[in-house]
Image (spheres, helix red, strand yellow):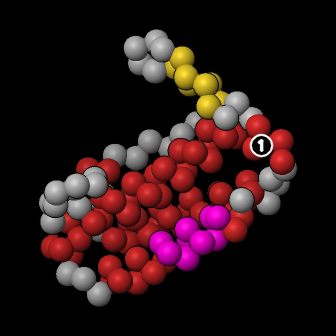
Amino acid sequence: MLELFSYNWKIREEWFEWCRKIEQGELVKERTGGMGSILKNLFHVVDCEQIWMNQLQGKSVMVKDVRMVSKLDEVITFSEVTRKQTESFLSLWTPAYEKKEIIRTSKSGKTYHFT
């Protein structure tokens, strides 16, 4: 599992390096597809990681409003915090986690089971 995340973090860092060379206006420019902008897409990638890791651990998910994120440095900071938490959890990883069932109930009351 750590190899998968290490690869993701490497690619994410490459995206951040590329984004540092792009004007702020291009990062927040609304586009077709994805989450609407480059910055929002990067935020979404990090947010999905923290949601998945927190749910796997039975912890509360950090709720961050993507509409409040307007700068690349905010996404990078969020990524760094999330990565540290993920690395800490993955250092304790056992094969039992691969069979762990996660149960979530939607706002409509429907229950979903994930493994």
Evaluate whether residue 83 shows in this view. yes
Q: Secondary structure at mark 1?
A: helix
Which residue occupies the foreground of this view, 18 or 99? 99
Q: Residue at x 38, y 63 (%)?
A: 42
Query: Compared with residue 21, is residue 50 higher up or lower down, i.e. above or below?
Result: above
Q: Main secondary structure of the magenta part?
A: helix
Which residue occupies the foreground of this view, 12 or 63? 12
- Judged left or right of residue 92, residue 80 is left
Farthest-out residue, bottom: 21
Specify the quadrant of the image occupied by residue 96.
top right
The stretch drawn in magenta includes residue 10: yes
Q: Residue at x 65, y 57 (%)?
A: 85
Magenta-colored span = 4-12
Specify the quadrant of the image occupied by residue 24.
bottom left
Amino acid type, callout 1: Tyr
Q: Quadrant of the C terminus?
A: top right
Q: Residue at x 46, y 52 (%)?
A: 47
Q: Residue at x 44, y 70 (%)?
A: 76
- Judged left or right of residue 94, residue 59 is left
| Label 1 neighbour load within 10 Å: few <14, some 14-19, many 20+ | few
Measured as percent of width and height from the top left, residue 114 is found at: 62, 31
Measured as percent of width and height from the top left, residue 67 is found at: 26, 50
Which residue occupies the foreground of this view, 73 or 43? 43
- Judged left or right of residue 19, residue 16 is right
Query: Compared with residue 97, is residue 14 higher up or lower down, i.e. above or below?
Result: below
Measured as percent of width and height from the top left, residue 95 is found at: 83, 48
- Judged left or right of residue 25, residue 100 is right
Evaluate whether residue 68 shows in this view. no
According to the image, label 1 marks what residue?
97
Q: Quadrant of the N terminus?
A: bottom right
